[in-house]
Image: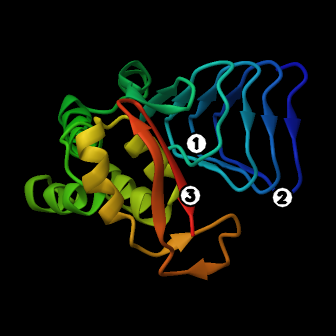
Amino acid sequence: MAYVHVAHDCRIEDNVILANSVQLGGHVHIGSHVIIGGTTPVHQFCKVGDHAMIGGGFRVVQDVPPYILAAGEPLKFNGLNSLGLRRKGFSPKVRKLIKEAYQSIYQSNINVSSALRKIRDSIDTTVPEIQKIIESVNKSCKDLKIALSTSSSTSVVNRVMDIRMDIYWWNPGLRTSGWSLSVLSFSPGVTTFTIL
């Protein structure tokens, strides 16, 4: 639509809707069938997963996993993109599996590693959509912030211990490990971290 800016080295897959004044920083990857609401800036090197929908006017400063609705300041998981998935022909069974996977990640008060283990143990991981969710969470440290920002303060402490995983920072080609994160502050719904 009008006044959209796509910076250098961006990848935009098929059937994407970018509303008025969406601004994409460099090296952004937008998956297929994504909808981004108007006046939304997307920070450089961020990835937005397939079939995700981002509400208008919210800043995207971390990766957005596939199949979800993302909204709020800071941007966070706001449920599944159920209507979009239904319109695109996802079966009720697959939609239910996607919902169960994201409930494990965002609404179960366990850390991310435990949530992924729970998904592998209890959900059919041969389903391509579930594989895509697991891959998305494993590849991104920025989407962990989405998971953490929806946590209660007690589960944040559990999740902090889980962040000792390999982190792919701003440059996807730069692989670093052993980062130490410390909690600056947290309250239900908002958590601030610093990288040491």
User: Dot 1, crowdedness within 10 Å: few (<14), some or many (≥20)?
Assistant: some
Kind of residue at badge 1: Ser
- Image quadrant of residue 89? top left
The extreme left residue here reads 122
**Tags 3 and 1 touching, CB below 8 Å:** no
Residue placed most toward the observer, 174 or 73: 73
Q: CA distance from mark 2 to mark 3?
A: 28 Å
Q: CA distance from mark 2 to mark 1?
A: 17 Å
Residue placed most toward the observer, 42 or 187: 187
Q: Which mark is residue 194?
A: 3
Q: Quadrant of the N terminus?
A: top right
- Image quadrant of residue 107? top left
Say if residue 170 shows up in the picture: yes
Q: Which mark is residue 114?
A: none
Q: CA distance from mark 3 to mark 1?
A: 32 Å
Q: Residue at x 46, y 75 (%)?
A: 166
Q: Is residue 161 left or right of residue 108?
A: right
- Image quadrant of residue 3? top right
Q: Mark 2 = which residue? A: 9
Q: Which mark is residue 32?
A: 1
Q: Is residue 28 left or right of residue 120?
A: right
Kind of residue at badge 2: Asp
